[in-house]
């Protein structure tokens, strides 16, 4: 994934518009409300205050966030697998945002891909590019006080340190008074602002409660599933190791699922088309899951079925209103936190340098969203392709065989890189597609597919299968 590098203050200053070119611009003392203190709201507030200070524009930012990220369970959680690609950690570090060790668990160094025919462990193609896992709140329900800090809590604290004021209140609606947005709160009148940034994700109905002058907020969503299993740390180490386990099972409506070990918990994330209980049961009973799920794990100490954004609104802005993060445009099925960073920063730059009119957002914010949407269209095609072919045994055997062979050699790990990037979010879908069109990849794939046509040609005999942790040399059931 290519993330826009940080613009220097000098570069941004040269981008300042002639006075009055966009009509609505922020003036000294402007008041900005940010609704939602998840990653998008915190990044937006942080960058807005940072850039405004650099150009000597005094503004106030109020963040409305009722959730306490120090709480365990749903009260402090923003429902997520908590995987952050190392490339995003590095981009944030370049921004001066260094996530402390208490927030980022750096334990995940490889992926194990499971199919019905067997499993293969994929080591990080670039050694420095390990994956970070985080808890968005303070861990699962009833977990007590965890020895780590919440990722969302850290970002929110960072925005507060930059000068944002945190209001622990729910926003129940948005009206317009004399052309200015006014927030509503349960049982009380809210105040008006020069700009409202909605960063409420997709599990809130607030975008639908914006009356008049609203953006075209027809976000398409689908239901996912996420739950935590508990087991003792040693059992988890023995069964899952320090790898994230991804499942490409032949189950209708399932795109993919992942088991992520985190201390004495294992997070299960299931993504696909409107995930429901029968699909979860079929998945948990599938051979790949049974092979690697820790025995005696206590199921679902905490579970939920949050929505995920699969298509953003056509126009995530209006005069004095902008939607950032999940409630606007995000990446399909992965790296939502990276997309929250990108959209929040693009919106903050637009607001300071180009103003808060719909026109300013159209010309300066929308291109960043459109780039993500265009890439998602490629992602949709790739997931559709995988969905069609993963039902074919010889295709699964071919992919598995090619990956196993690559992992035994140091060079030309093309299939490994494609799978790695598909699951980590480290590369754009376009980049992944281009890699699959490389003649060496196509030739390798055709060769392994041909061998995969023979049942038993999955490399078990010749290359050795993988056990639950994906270690080479052991046959699989
Ligand atoms: C099952 C699942 C697994 C995922 N796994 C990953 C992953 O591993 N890695 C990754 O990068 N992304 C992942 N994502 C996506 C990621 O969770 C989102 O992209 C990311 O959280 C978006 O951040 P956000 O700030 O836009 O929204 P959110 O994180 O949803 O934050 C919205 C905030 O707004 C607040 N809010 C809502 N309504 C109101 C209101 N009316 N008033 C005031 N505050 C309000 C909420 O309390 C919340 O704190 C996953 C998503 C799902 C569903």
Image (spheres, rainbow, N blue to C red):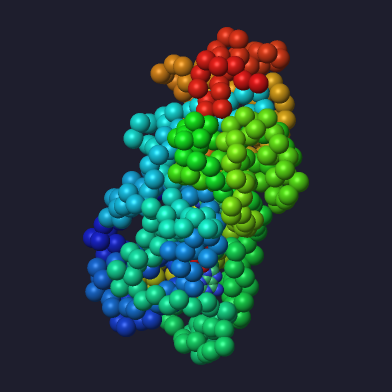
- The residue closer to the viewer here, 381 or 91, is 91
Q: Return the residue found at the far right.
A: 278
| Residue 339 percent across, percent down from the top left | 47, 54
Residue at 35%, 73% (x, y): give it. 164
Q: Is residue 244 left or right of residue 216?
A: left
> Residue drawn 53% across and 65% down?
75
As rendered, which of 94 and 282 lies closer to the eye?
282
Horizontal and vertical percent position of residue 382 = 61, 38
Of residues 136 and 179, which is closer to you in this image?
136
Residue shown at the point (45%, 44%) measured from the top left: 263
Left or right position of 364 against 446 = left
Examine the image and state in which quarter residue 105 appears. top left
Q: Quadrant of the C terminus?
A: top right
Quadrant of image for the N terminus: top left
- Can residue 405 be seen in this snapshot? yes
Q: Which residue shows up at 54% across the image and 58% down it?
A: 141
Left or right of 308 in this view: 262? left
């Amino acid at each position: 994934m290519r993330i826009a590098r940080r613009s220097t203050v000098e570069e941004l200053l040269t981008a300042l518009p002639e006075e009055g070119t966009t009509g609505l611009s922020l003036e000294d003392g402007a008041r900005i409300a940010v609704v939602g203190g998840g990653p998008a709201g915190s990044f937006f507030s942080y960058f807005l205050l940072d850039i405004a200070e650099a150009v000597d524009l005094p503004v106030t930012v109020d963040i409305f966030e009722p959730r306490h990220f120090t709480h365990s369970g749903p009260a402090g959680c923003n429902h997520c697998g908590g995987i952050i690609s190392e490339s995003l950690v590095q981009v944030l570090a370049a921004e001066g945002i260094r996530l402390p060790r208490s927030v980022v668990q750096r334990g995940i160094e490889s992926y194990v891909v499971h199919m019905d025919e067997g499993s293969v462990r994929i080591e990080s193609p670039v050694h420095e590019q390990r994956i970070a896992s985080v808890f968005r709140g303070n861990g699962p329900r009833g977990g007590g006080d965890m020895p780590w800090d919440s990722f969302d809590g850290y970002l929110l604290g960072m925005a507060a340190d930059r000068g944002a004021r945190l209001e622990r209140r729910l926003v129940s609606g948005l009206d317009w008074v004399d052309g200015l947005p006014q927030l509503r709160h349960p049982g009380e009148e809210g105040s008006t602002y020069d700009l409202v940034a909605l960063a409420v994700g997709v599990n809130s109905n607030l975008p639908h409660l914006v009356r008049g002058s609203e953006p075209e907020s027809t976000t398409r969503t689908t239901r996912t599933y996420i739950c935590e299993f508990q087991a003792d740390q040693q059992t988890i180490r023995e069964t899952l190791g320090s790898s994230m386990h991804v499942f490409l099972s032949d189950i209708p409506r399932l795109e993919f699922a992942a088991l992520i070990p985190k201390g004495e918990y294992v997070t299960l994330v299931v993504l696909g088309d409107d995930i429901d209980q029968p699909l979860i049961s079929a998945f948990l009973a599938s051979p790949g899951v049974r092979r690697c799920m820790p025995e005696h794990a206590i199921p679902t100490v905490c579970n939920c079925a949050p929505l995920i954004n699969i298509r953003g609104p056509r126009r995530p802005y209006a005069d004095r209103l902008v939607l950032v993060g999940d409630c606007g445009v995000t990446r399909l099925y992965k790296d939502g936190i990276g997309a929250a960073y990108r959209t929040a920063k693009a919106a903050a730059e637009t607001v300071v340098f180009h103003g808060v009119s719909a026109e300013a957002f159209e010309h300066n914010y929308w291109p960043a969203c459109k780039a993500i949407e265009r890439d998602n269209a490629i992602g949709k095609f790739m997931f559709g392709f995988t969905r069609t072919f993963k039902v074919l045994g010889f295709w699964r055997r071919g992919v598995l065989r090619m990956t196993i062979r690559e992992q035994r050699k140091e060079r030309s790990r093309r299939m490994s890189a494609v799978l790695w990037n598909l699951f980590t979010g480290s590369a754009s879908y376009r980049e992944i597609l281009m890699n699959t069109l490389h003649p060496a990849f196509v030739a390798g794939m055709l060769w392994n597919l041909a061998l995969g046509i023979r049942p038993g040609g999955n490399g078990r005999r010749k290359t050795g299968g993988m056990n639950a942790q994906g270690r080479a040399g052991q046959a699989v059931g």
